[in-house]
Amino acid sequence: MDATTLAFAGAAEQARLIRDGEATSRAVVEATLARIAKIDPLINAYRVVLAERALAEADQADGRRGAGDSRPLLGVPVAIKDDVDVAGEPTAWGGAAHAGPVARDAEVIRRLRAAGAIIIGKTLVPEMTMLPSTDTTTFGSSRNPWDLNRTPGGSSGGSGAAMASGLAGVALGSDGAGSIRTPSAWNGLFGLKPTRDRVPLAPHDDAWQGLSVSGPLARRVVDAALFLDATVDDGDVPEGGFVGAAAREPGRLRIAVSTKAPPGAMPWLGREERRAVQDMAALLRGLGHDVVERDPDYPGSLWPAGLVRVMRGVGDDVAAFMPHPERLEPRTRALAALGRRTPASLVRWAREAEVEQTARLSKLWEDVDVLLTPATADGPYRVGVVGRWSTPVYLVRGAERLTWMPAWNITGQPAAAVPAGLDDDGLPIGVQLVGRRGEDGLLLSLAAQVEAARPWIDRRPGAIA
């Protein structure tokens, strides 16, 4: 297998090749690092690459495999979003206001290492993970490997660009209002926002006032499933594991399809994005599912309550992790100040409103198993456009293309971005699948069925060819 094919193989296949002795971890890591050296200067996906440490750990992984070690991610290179602590490295959050190297791995990193993963580097984020585009003053902008003039999205934009370019086996992202699903949709990836609290956030518990979760961005569904098997508590893993769930047929499901926008959201939906939803609905019908048109009962309080939680969350993160706030971008400082000045009574209202919001939205799942919606309202922004937004513009437009995503951060339900073809400019389009709380395995099963019926793995971005 040539180095490029090896780098693009994805975590599950890389793990199998290493386990079966068909490739060494050193070969996989070297192929990945060579590709990073070639491609990352074009796309700026990584804030830092841990090359020497990764090669040393690859040699250790090969020795352990020879001694019979069979951990699920043994020797596989994994990319980490730079809002998660990796011991010995700064958690920069896309800026220069951080405290320097951290002493300990975050819990999810500890679990990935325990599963045998090799941390290949930390991927770029917009400052304080605020933007739907990965534009920063400190580190520049990440670029979409399908079109270098476009953003890969945000805030897990570096992870999305890296995965689409074959620069890791799987990537860790976080999602407080669509930050896994947007880069996945815009880079032709499968991305899963798991059920809340399934993947540990410690030491950053209750991030963004309970909205944010960690999860995988992957080239294939099985890669995301393997990530979950390595990071989720045993008591939350379905029988046979998440990889087993991805391998099972989902059975005949009742699937609601909706393009209705929540109240307060900008209701515009692009022609190509609407067509992608219609095409996916037709595919699901062809696979034997009962697909019906049915809209969620979106509460009017969703948008204002979510915005309060995001603003307070940014303010909390700046206070907790940024000892040099004077180095922050002006927009970040302004939003953090707004968040910190938000009255406690308003934050309490926003948190308590979740009970009624979840109850209303959950009624849909009394009659259906899965909801199909658009992922994004339109394609990716031009590089740098979002980075120039002022604070008022951000508050008005921050979620304009993420319209169908934030509701499920509020309810804590699992939601996935699934590749759904290319638009007229040759850029990826995704759709969103939402499941009941705790039914991440069912989403994996359904997405894997879609992947088998309409494979996307061989599509590679032409801008970096």
Image: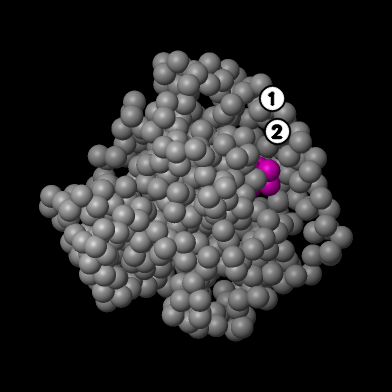
- Disc assigned to residue 366: 1
Label 2: element kind: helix
Q: Is residue 407 magenta?
A: yes
Q: Residue 298, how many percent across, how many down?
A: 72, 35
Q: Is residue 392 magenta?
A: no
Q: Residue 151, how many percent across, how many down?
A: 42, 55
Camera-side residue of 296 and 415: 415
Q: Residue 317, how many percent across, how many down?
A: 64, 70
Q: Distance of mark 2 from mark 1, alpha carbons?
A: 7 Å
Q: Is residue 447 left or right of residue 129?
A: left
Residue 116 in view of the camera = yes
Range of magenta residues: 406-411
Q: Are marks 2 and 1 in contact (CB under 8 Å)?
A: yes
Residue 279 in view of the camera = no
Magenta stretch, overall SS: helix
Residue under circle 2? 362
The amino acid beneath tag 2 is Ser
Q: Is residue 329 left or right of residue 185?
A: right
Tell me if mark 2 has few (under 14), some (14-19) or many (20+) residues whose alpha carbon lies within 10 angstroms of its own: some
Q: Residue at x 78, y 53 (%)?
A: 351
